[in-house]
Image (tube, grey):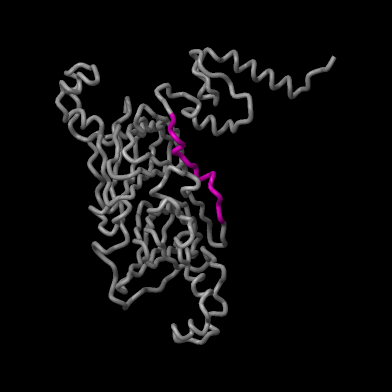
Amino acid sequence: MKVPSFAALLFASSVSALVIKRDSPQFNQGEPIDGKGKGAPILGGTNHQVDLANPSNLGEQSTDSGTVPNLKWRFSDSKTKIFNGGWVREQVIQDLPQSHDISAAQQHLKKGATRELHWHRVAEWGIVYTGRVLVSAVDENGKYQVDELGYGDIWYFPKGQAHTVHGLDDENEYLLAFDEGDFDKVGTTFNIDDWISKTPRSILAKNFGVPESVFSTVPSPNPYIVNGTVSHRNVTGGNGPLVGNSSYVYHTFQHDPEPVPGGGGIFYKIDSTNFPIAKTIAATFVTLEPGGLRELHWHPTAEEWLYFHAGTARATVFIGSGNSRTFDFSAGDTAVFPDNSGHYIENTSKTQNLTWIELYKSDRVADIPLTQWLALTPADIVANVLKIDVGIVERLKKEKQVLIKGTGA
Protein backbone atom coordinates (compact mmCIF):
# COMPACT_ATOMS: atom_id res chain seq x y z
CA MET A 1 0.00 0.00 0.00
CA LYS A 2 1.38 3.40 -1.04
CA VAL A 3 1.58 5.90 1.84
CA PRO A 4 0.64 9.52 0.91
CA SER A 5 3.52 11.97 1.18
CA PHE A 6 3.55 14.71 3.80
CA ALA A 7 3.04 17.30 1.02
CA ALA A 8 -0.01 15.43 -0.29
CA LEU A 9 -1.50 15.21 3.19
CA LEU A 10 -0.86 18.90 3.79
CA PHE A 11 -2.50 19.79 0.45
CA ALA A 12 -5.53 17.62 1.21
CA SER A 13 -5.82 19.16 4.68
CA SER A 14 -5.82 22.72 3.32
CA VAL A 15 -8.49 21.84 0.75
CA SER A 16 -10.63 20.28 3.48
CA ALA A 17 -10.35 23.39 5.64
CA LEU A 18 -11.46 25.57 2.74
CA VAL A 19 -14.47 23.37 2.03
CA ILE A 20 -15.63 23.76 5.62
CA LYS A 21 -15.60 27.55 5.25
CA ARG A 22 -17.79 27.73 2.14
CA ASP A 23 -20.75 28.83 4.24
CA SER A 24 -19.26 32.34 4.66
CA PRO A 25 -17.51 34.75 2.27
CA GLN A 26 -13.82 34.00 1.83
CA PHE A 27 -12.73 36.96 -0.32
CA ASN A 28 -10.69 38.41 2.54
CA GLN A 29 -8.89 35.06 2.72
CA GLY A 30 -7.95 35.25 -0.95
CA GLU A 31 -10.53 32.69 -2.12
CA PRO A 32 -13.38 33.17 -4.66
CA ILE A 33 -16.18 31.98 -2.36
CA ASP A 34 -19.25 34.14 -1.66
CA GLY A 35 -20.73 32.06 1.19
CA LYS A 36 -24.02 31.70 -0.72
CA GLY A 37 -23.14 28.74 -2.88
CA LYS A 38 -21.05 30.44 -5.54
CA GLY A 39 -17.33 29.87 -6.04
CA ALA A 40 -14.75 27.39 -4.80
CA PRO A 41 -11.16 27.47 -3.50
CA ILE A 42 -8.19 28.09 -5.79
CA LEU A 43 -6.23 24.83 -5.92
CA GLY A 44 -3.76 25.59 -8.69
CA GLY A 45 -0.82 27.95 -8.72
CA THR A 46 -1.63 31.48 -7.60
CA ASN A 47 0.00 34.48 -5.94
CA HIS A 48 -1.84 34.48 -2.64
CA GLN A 49 -0.65 37.94 -1.61
CA VAL A 50 -1.99 39.41 -4.85
CA ASP A 51 -5.29 37.58 -4.32
CA LEU A 52 -5.58 39.00 -0.80
CA ALA A 53 -4.94 42.53 -2.08
CA ASN A 54 -7.50 42.21 -4.87
CA PRO A 55 -10.71 40.68 -3.51
CA SER A 56 -12.72 42.36 -6.27
CA ASN A 57 -10.89 40.20 -8.82
CA LEU A 58 -12.20 37.14 -6.98
CA GLY A 59 -15.84 38.08 -7.58
CA GLU A 60 -16.51 40.00 -4.35
CA GLN A 61 -18.66 42.61 -6.11
CA SER A 62 -21.82 40.86 -7.24
CA THR A 63 -22.78 43.83 -9.44
CA ASP A 64 -19.79 43.31 -11.77
CA SER A 65 -20.94 42.14 -15.18
CA GLY A 66 -19.78 41.49 -18.72
CA THR A 67 -16.26 41.81 -20.06
CA VAL A 68 -14.10 44.74 -19.00
CA PRO A 69 -10.36 44.64 -19.81
CA ASN A 70 -7.72 45.07 -17.15
CA LEU A 71 -7.47 48.76 -16.21
CA LYS A 72 -4.77 48.49 -13.52
CA TRP A 73 -0.98 48.29 -13.42
CA ARG A 74 1.35 48.10 -10.42
CA PHE A 75 4.64 49.97 -10.61
CA SER A 76 6.02 47.03 -8.61
CA ASP A 77 5.57 44.94 -11.77
CA SER A 78 7.64 47.37 -13.85
CA LYS A 79 11.28 46.73 -14.73
CA THR A 80 13.48 49.08 -12.68
CA LYS A 81 16.51 50.56 -14.43
CA ILE A 82 19.24 51.50 -11.95
CA PHE A 83 22.01 54.07 -12.37
CA ASN A 84 24.80 55.51 -10.24
CA GLY A 85 22.60 58.50 -9.40
CA GLY A 86 19.21 56.83 -8.95
CA TRP A 87 16.62 54.73 -10.77
CA VAL A 88 13.50 54.82 -12.95
CA ARG A 89 10.59 52.47 -13.62
CA GLU A 90 7.91 53.02 -16.26
CA GLN A 91 4.31 52.21 -17.10
CA VAL A 92 3.70 52.42 -20.85
CA ILE A 93 1.04 51.12 -23.22
CA GLN A 94 2.77 47.74 -23.46
CA ASP A 95 2.16 47.37 -19.69
CA LEU A 96 -1.39 48.79 -19.62
CA PRO A 97 -2.81 48.55 -23.16
CA GLN A 98 -5.98 50.47 -22.27
CA SER A 99 -3.95 53.60 -21.45
CA HIS A 100 -3.82 55.24 -24.86
CA ASP A 101 -3.31 58.85 -23.73
CA ILE A 102 -0.84 58.76 -20.84
CA SER A 103 2.35 56.89 -19.95
CA ALA A 104 4.23 57.43 -16.71
CA ALA A 105 7.29 56.71 -14.60
CA GLN A 106 8.57 56.93 -11.07
CA GLN A 107 12.05 58.43 -10.96
CA HIS A 108 14.54 58.73 -8.09
CA LEU A 109 17.57 61.01 -7.82
CA LYS A 110 20.27 61.02 -5.17
CA LYS A 111 21.59 64.31 -3.83
CA GLY A 112 23.43 66.12 -6.60
CA ALA A 113 22.32 63.63 -9.26
CA THR A 114 20.90 64.87 -12.54
CA ARG A 115 18.50 63.45 -15.08
CA GLU A 116 20.66 64.42 -18.03
CA LEU A 117 19.71 67.31 -20.31
CA HIS A 118 17.08 66.20 -22.83
CA TRP A 119 13.86 66.96 -24.65
CA HIS A 120 10.86 64.97 -25.88
CA ARG A 121 8.56 64.78 -28.86
CA VAL A 122 5.74 64.74 -26.29
CA ALA A 123 4.85 66.92 -23.31
CA GLU A 124 6.27 66.00 -19.88
CA TRP A 125 4.40 66.53 -16.60
CA GLY A 126 5.94 65.89 -13.17
CA ILE A 127 5.04 66.09 -9.48
CA VAL A 128 7.45 65.82 -6.54
CA TYR A 129 6.40 63.55 -3.67
CA THR A 130 9.68 63.15 -1.78
CA GLY A 131 12.58 65.57 -1.32
CA ARG A 132 13.37 68.63 -3.39
CA VAL A 133 14.51 69.04 -6.98
CA LEU A 134 15.80 71.83 -9.17
CA VAL A 135 14.24 71.99 -12.61
CA SER A 136 15.75 74.06 -15.39
CA ALA A 137 14.50 74.66 -18.91
CA VAL A 138 14.98 76.89 -21.94
CA ASP A 139 12.33 77.72 -24.56
CA GLU A 140 12.57 78.59 -28.25
CA ASN A 141 12.79 82.31 -27.46
CA GLY A 142 15.90 82.00 -25.30
CA LYS A 143 13.96 82.44 -22.06
CA TYR A 144 14.86 80.16 -19.17
CA GLN A 145 13.54 78.86 -15.85
CA VAL A 146 15.45 77.55 -12.83
CA ASP A 147 13.16 76.73 -9.92
CA GLU A 148 13.18 74.64 -6.75
CA LEU A 149 10.25 72.26 -6.25
CA GLY A 150 9.17 70.37 -3.13
CA TYR A 151 6.29 68.11 -2.11
CA GLY A 152 3.23 68.56 -4.31
CA ASP A 153 4.91 70.98 -6.73
CA ILE A 154 4.37 70.37 -10.44
CA TRP A 155 6.16 71.07 -13.70
CA TYR A 156 4.97 70.90 -17.29
CA PHE A 157 7.35 71.03 -20.26
CA PRO A 158 5.66 71.33 -23.68
CA LYS A 159 6.94 69.03 -26.42
CA GLY A 160 10.36 70.00 -27.66
CA GLN A 161 11.35 72.12 -24.64
CA ALA A 162 14.92 71.55 -23.38
CA HIS A 163 15.04 70.67 -19.68
CA THR A 164 16.65 68.74 -16.84
CA VAL A 165 15.93 67.71 -13.22
CA HIS A 166 18.52 67.86 -10.41
CA GLY A 167 18.32 66.32 -6.90
CA LEU A 168 18.74 68.64 -3.89
CA ASP A 169 17.95 66.50 -0.82
CA ASP A 170 19.60 63.22 0.16
CA GLU A 171 16.84 61.28 -1.62
CA ASN A 172 14.39 62.75 -4.14
CA GLU A 173 11.53 61.09 -5.97
CA TYR A 174 8.76 62.18 -8.32
CA LEU A 175 6.12 60.97 -10.72
CA LEU A 176 6.54 61.69 -14.43
CA ALA A 177 3.76 61.55 -17.02
CA PHE A 178 3.65 62.06 -20.78
CA ASP A 179 0.78 62.79 -23.17
CA GLU A 180 1.54 59.65 -25.21
CA GLY A 181 0.72 56.09 -24.18
CA ASP A 182 3.44 54.54 -26.36
CA PHE A 183 6.29 56.50 -24.80
CA ASP A 184 9.11 54.05 -25.55
CA LYS A 185 8.88 54.15 -29.32
CA VAL A 186 11.93 55.40 -31.22
CA GLY A 187 12.27 59.15 -31.45
CA THR A 188 10.35 60.09 -28.32
CA THR A 189 13.31 61.23 -26.19
CA PHE A 190 16.46 63.08 -27.27
CA ASN A 191 19.38 63.02 -24.81
CA ILE A 192 22.24 65.50 -25.07
CA ASP A 193 25.02 62.95 -24.52
CA ASP A 194 23.63 60.80 -27.32
CA TRP A 195 23.55 63.67 -29.77
CA ILE A 196 26.98 65.05 -28.96
CA SER A 197 28.65 61.62 -29.03
CA LYS A 198 27.09 60.92 -32.46
CA THR A 199 28.30 64.21 -33.98
CA PRO A 200 31.79 64.56 -35.55
CA ARG A 201 34.15 66.33 -33.15
CA SER A 202 35.24 68.71 -35.87
CA ILE A 203 31.63 69.89 -36.17
CA LEU A 204 31.31 70.20 -32.40
CA ALA A 205 34.49 72.28 -32.21
CA LYS A 206 33.26 74.58 -34.97
CA ASN A 207 29.79 74.89 -33.40
CA PHE A 208 30.94 75.66 -29.85
CA GLY A 209 34.18 77.45 -30.68
CA VAL A 210 36.34 75.15 -28.54
CA PRO A 211 39.04 72.51 -29.21
CA GLU A 212 37.94 69.03 -30.35
CA SER A 213 39.60 67.50 -27.26
CA VAL A 214 36.91 69.05 -25.05
CA PHE A 215 34.51 66.30 -26.17
CA SER A 216 36.78 63.29 -25.67
CA THR A 217 35.09 62.33 -22.39
CA VAL A 218 31.42 62.71 -23.38
CA PRO A 219 29.64 59.49 -22.28
CA SER A 220 28.20 57.12 -24.88
CA PRO A 221 25.66 55.67 -24.75
CA ASN A 222 23.85 58.25 -22.65
CA PRO A 223 24.11 57.83 -18.87
CA TYR A 224 20.45 58.89 -18.27
CA ILE A 225 21.05 59.74 -14.58
CA VAL A 226 24.48 60.97 -13.48
CA ASN A 227 26.02 61.59 -10.06
CA GLY A 228 27.26 65.06 -9.17
CA THR A 229 27.19 67.76 -6.53
CA VAL A 230 24.34 70.12 -5.73
CA SER A 231 24.33 73.07 -8.12
CA HIS A 232 24.84 76.53 -6.63
CA ARG A 233 25.23 78.47 -9.89
CA ASN A 234 22.74 81.12 -10.97
CA VAL A 235 21.56 81.64 -14.54
CA THR A 236 21.48 85.11 -16.10
CA GLY A 237 21.29 86.64 -19.56
CA GLY A 238 19.39 85.34 -22.53
CA ASN A 239 15.96 86.90 -22.92
CA GLY A 240 15.15 86.64 -19.24
CA PRO A 241 13.30 84.18 -17.01
CA LEU A 242 10.03 82.42 -17.79
CA VAL A 243 7.44 83.82 -15.38
CA GLY A 244 3.70 84.31 -15.09
CA ASN A 245 1.65 82.51 -17.73
CA SER A 246 4.88 81.29 -19.37
CA SER A 247 6.15 79.54 -16.23
CA TYR A 248 6.76 75.80 -16.45
CA VAL A 249 6.23 75.39 -12.68
CA TYR A 250 3.15 75.32 -10.45
CA HIS A 251 3.60 75.41 -6.66
CA THR A 252 0.43 73.56 -5.70
CA PHE A 253 0.14 74.41 -2.01
CA GLN A 254 0.68 78.12 -2.62
CA HIS A 255 -2.84 78.06 -4.08
CA ASP A 256 -6.21 77.35 -2.50
CA PRO A 257 -7.84 73.96 -3.14
CA GLU A 258 -11.11 73.70 -5.04
CA PRO A 259 -14.34 73.96 -3.00
CA VAL A 260 -15.58 70.50 -1.98
CA PRO A 261 -19.26 70.67 -0.93
CA GLY A 262 -19.22 67.00 0.13
CA GLY A 263 -16.65 67.81 2.83
CA GLY A 264 -14.81 64.52 2.47
CA GLY A 265 -11.34 65.69 1.60
CA ILE A 266 -9.13 68.11 -0.31
CA PHE A 267 -9.20 68.57 -4.08
CA TYR A 268 -6.65 70.56 -6.10
CA LYS A 269 -7.20 71.16 -9.81
CA ILE A 270 -4.17 72.02 -11.95
CA ASP A 271 -4.96 72.67 -15.63
CA SER A 272 -4.73 75.43 -18.21
CA THR A 273 -7.28 77.55 -16.30
CA ASN A 274 -4.77 78.15 -13.50
CA PHE A 275 -1.52 76.79 -15.03
CA PRO A 276 -1.70 78.25 -18.55
CA ILE A 277 1.33 76.47 -20.02
CA ALA A 278 -0.26 73.04 -19.39
CA LYS A 279 -2.20 72.74 -22.63
CA THR A 280 -2.20 68.95 -23.06
CA ILE A 281 -2.20 67.49 -19.53
CA ALA A 282 -4.79 68.46 -16.93
CA ALA A 283 -4.49 67.15 -13.38
CA THR A 284 -6.03 66.86 -9.95
CA PHE A 285 -4.29 66.17 -6.63
CA VAL A 286 -6.79 64.52 -4.28
CA THR A 287 -6.87 63.53 -0.61
CA LEU A 288 -9.96 61.58 0.51
CA GLU A 289 -10.78 60.97 4.17
CA PRO A 290 -11.23 57.43 5.58
CA GLY A 291 -14.40 55.82 4.26
CA GLY A 292 -15.00 58.73 1.90
CA LEU A 293 -16.24 58.57 -1.68
CA ARG A 294 -15.25 60.39 -4.86
CA GLU A 295 -18.82 60.71 -6.10
CA LEU A 296 -20.18 58.77 -9.10
CA HIS A 297 -19.22 60.68 -12.25
CA TRP A 298 -17.64 60.53 -15.69
CA HIS A 299 -15.26 62.67 -17.73
CA PRO A 300 -16.50 63.97 -21.10
CA THR A 301 -13.15 65.06 -22.55
CA ALA A 302 -10.61 62.24 -22.10
CA GLU A 303 -9.51 59.02 -20.44
CA GLU A 304 -8.72 59.33 -16.75
CA TRP A 305 -5.26 58.09 -15.77
CA LEU A 306 -4.57 57.61 -12.04
CA TYR A 307 -1.62 57.13 -9.72
CA PHE A 308 -2.39 56.03 -6.15
CA HIS A 309 0.24 57.45 -3.81
CA ALA A 310 -0.99 56.45 -0.33
CA GLY A 311 -3.83 54.43 1.18
CA THR A 312 -6.20 51.81 -0.22
CA ALA A 313 -9.09 52.23 -2.60
CA ARG A 314 -11.83 50.51 -4.55
CA ALA A 315 -13.44 51.63 -7.81
CA THR A 316 -16.10 50.17 -10.07
CA VAL A 317 -15.85 51.20 -13.72
CA PHE A 318 -18.95 51.10 -15.94
CA ILE A 319 -18.02 51.06 -19.65
CA GLY A 320 -21.53 50.89 -21.08
CA SER A 321 -23.85 48.16 -22.40
CA GLY A 322 -24.15 46.59 -18.96
CA ASN A 323 -20.41 45.98 -18.55
CA SER A 324 -18.72 46.88 -15.26
CA ARG A 325 -15.74 45.72 -13.21
CA THR A 326 -14.41 46.54 -9.76
CA PHE A 327 -10.73 47.05 -8.95
CA ASP A 328 -8.80 47.32 -5.67
CA PHE A 329 -5.91 49.77 -5.42
CA SER A 330 -3.02 50.46 -3.06
CA ALA A 331 0.03 52.73 -3.06
CA GLY A 332 2.09 52.47 -6.24
CA ASP A 333 -0.79 51.33 -8.44
CA THR A 334 -1.76 53.08 -11.65
CA ALA A 335 -5.04 52.80 -13.50
CA VAL A 336 -6.92 54.11 -16.50
CA PHE A 337 -10.67 54.63 -16.72
CA PRO A 338 -11.85 54.67 -20.35
CA ASP A 339 -13.09 57.83 -22.02
CA ASN A 340 -16.57 58.72 -20.66
CA SER A 341 -16.83 55.61 -18.44
CA GLY A 342 -18.85 56.00 -15.24
CA HIS A 343 -17.00 55.34 -11.99
CA TYR A 344 -16.38 56.23 -8.35
CA ILE A 345 -13.38 55.94 -6.03
CA GLU A 346 -13.88 54.81 -2.42
CA ASN A 347 -11.35 55.02 0.41
CA THR A 348 -11.53 51.51 1.87
CA SER A 349 -9.51 52.38 4.98
CA LYS A 350 -11.21 53.34 8.26
CA THR A 351 -8.14 55.17 9.55
CA GLN A 352 -5.88 56.33 6.67
CA ASN A 353 -6.33 59.08 4.12
CA LEU A 354 -6.27 58.09 0.45
CA THR A 355 -4.09 60.25 -1.81
CA TRP A 356 -4.06 59.99 -5.58
CA ILE A 357 -3.39 61.96 -8.75
CA GLU A 358 -5.66 62.11 -11.80
CA LEU A 359 -4.35 63.05 -15.26
CA TYR A 360 -6.18 63.78 -18.51
CA LYS A 361 -4.87 64.40 -22.02
CA SER A 362 -6.82 67.61 -22.15
CA ASP A 363 -6.49 71.32 -21.49
CA ARG A 364 -8.90 71.17 -18.56
CA VAL A 365 -10.36 68.93 -15.87
CA ALA A 366 -14.04 68.22 -16.57
CA ASP A 367 -16.48 65.83 -14.94
CA ILE A 368 -20.24 65.27 -14.85
CA PRO A 369 -21.59 63.96 -11.51
CA LEU A 370 -24.43 61.46 -11.59
CA THR A 371 -26.30 63.05 -8.68
CA GLN A 372 -26.20 66.57 -10.14
CA TRP A 373 -27.41 65.29 -13.51
CA LEU A 374 -30.42 63.59 -11.94
CA ALA A 375 -31.15 66.57 -9.66
CA LEU A 376 -31.25 68.96 -12.63
CA THR A 377 -33.54 66.72 -14.71
CA PRO A 378 -37.34 66.90 -14.23
CA ALA A 379 -37.93 64.84 -11.11
CA ASP A 380 -40.94 62.95 -12.42
CA ILE A 381 -38.99 61.76 -15.46
CA VAL A 382 -36.12 60.48 -13.27
CA ALA A 383 -38.54 58.80 -10.86
CA ASN A 384 -40.35 57.02 -13.68
CA VAL A 385 -37.14 55.79 -15.35
CA LEU A 386 -35.53 54.53 -12.12
CA LYS A 387 -38.84 53.46 -10.50
CA ILE A 388 -38.15 55.37 -7.30
CA ASP A 389 -40.22 57.85 -5.31
CA VAL A 390 -40.31 61.34 -6.84
CA GLY A 391 -39.73 62.82 -3.38
CA ILE A 392 -36.34 61.12 -3.23
CA VAL A 393 -35.37 62.66 -6.56
CA GLU A 394 -36.47 66.12 -5.44
CA ARG A 395 -34.11 65.92 -2.47
CA LEU A 396 -31.01 65.10 -4.53
CA LYS A 397 -28.23 67.69 -4.25
CA LYS A 398 -28.00 70.08 -7.18
CA GLU A 399 -24.34 70.97 -6.48
CA LYS A 400 -21.32 68.82 -7.19
CA GLN A 401 -20.26 67.00 -4.03
CA VAL A 402 -16.90 65.77 -5.43
CA LEU A 403 -15.63 64.15 -2.17
CA ILE A 404 -18.32 62.74 0.10
CA LYS A 405 -17.68 62.01 3.78
CA GLY A 406 -17.73 58.38 4.80
CA THR A 407 -20.49 56.97 7.00
CA GLY A 408 -19.86 58.06 10.57
CA ALA A 409 -17.09 60.49 9.52
380 on left or right of 137: left
Q: Indicate the position of residue 136 as horizontal and vertical percent values.
A: 38, 67
In the rendered image, residue 384 lying in the magenta stretch gets the answer no
In the rendered image, the quadrant that contains the C terminus is top left
Residue 404 to residue 238: above or below? above
Name which quarter of the figure residue 47 lies in: top right
Give, as a single range, the part of the protein colored magenta.
67-81
The residue lying at 29 percent from left, 34 percent from top is: 297
283 on left or right of 83: left
303 on left or right of 86: left
Q: Indicate the position of residue 141 as horizontal and vertical percent values.
A: 29, 73
Residue 184 to residue 96: above or below? below
Which residue is farthest front? 321
Q: Indicate the position of residue 362 as horizontal and vertical percent values.
A: 30, 50
Residue 314 to residue 129: above or below? above
Q: Indicate the position of residue 272 as horizontal and vertical percent values.
A: 25, 54
In the rendered image, residue 77 lying in the magenta stretch gets the answer yes
Please name whichever residue, 260 or 323, is drawn nearer the observer in this view of the structure: 323
Please name whichever residue, 113 or 284, is drawn nearer the observer in this view of the structure: 284
The residue lying at 19 percent from left, 34 percent from top is: 399
Name which quarter of the figure residue 148 lies in: bottom left
The residue lying at 42 percent from left, 54 percent from top is: 176
The residue lying at 44 percent from left, 60 percent from top is: 188
In the rendered image, the quadrant that contains the N terminus is top right
